[in-house]
Amino acid sequence: MSDASSTGEKNDDAMLFKLQKAVQVFLAHPHPGLAFYKNCIELESNLASLGNDDSLVNARKLYEAALATYDQDSSLWKDYHSLETKLGTSETAAAINWRARKSLKDFAVVFNSPDQLQFLHVTQFMQF
């Protein structure tokens, strides 16, 4: 490995570490906005898809923190389930599905396929 390549990787790791620390500091404040959570989750999810196990753990923590405040946001549940389907286990994906069904009382959780959830508002089932 060349010195330039090694230096670049060290700089990338240092930058990632600083970014993750900044996110942790910001999340310590009460109720960050949903958009902030989603941006942080996207960053960690992308790193997790590249094989970074720490980022998968971080993405899960971010989802849990976001759901503590925004548990009625169906897109958040859908994205969390998608992450677990792609990078987690069938058990973790099933657990997220169960929690989403329990939490989203005004929504019906529908599977389009084994790896895709769809949330429909109860009124979409009503025929007048």
Image (tube, helix red, strand yellow):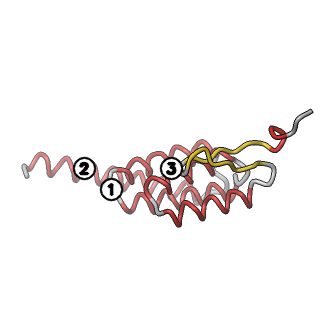
Toward the left, the furthest residue is 2
Q: Which mark is residue 11?
A: 2
User: What kind of residue is marked 2?
Assistant: Asn
Which residue is label 3 attached to?
A: 41
Residue 93 placement (x, y as % from top left): 54, 60
Residue 8 placement (x, y as % from top left): 19, 47
On-image quarter of the C terminus: top right
- Say which residue appears at 57% left-offset and 45% top-offset: 36
What distance separates the C-alpha of mark 2 from that of mark 1? Answer: 19 Å
Please tell me whether mark 3 or mark 1 is closer to you in this view: 1
Could you tell me if the residues under marks 2 and 1 are in contact, i.e. CB atoms within 8 Å?
A: no
User: What kind of residue is marked 1?
Assistant: Gly
User: What kind of residue is marked 3?
Assistant: Ile
What distance separates the C-alpha of mark 3 from that of mark 1? Answer: 15 Å
| Residue situated in front as seen by the camera: 2 or 88 | 88
Residue 49 placement (x, y as % from top left): 38, 51
Is 10 left, or right, of 52 in this rendering?
left
**Mark 2 / mark 1, whichever is N-terminal:** 2
Q: Residue 64 carries which label?
A: none
Mark 3 element type: helix
What distance separates the C-alpha of mark 3 from that of mark 2? Answer: 22 Å
Image quarter for residue 56? bottom left
Please tell me whether mark 2 or mark 1 is closer to you in this view: 1
Which residue is label 1 attached to?
A: 51
| Residue situated in front as seen by the camera: 78 or 47 | 78
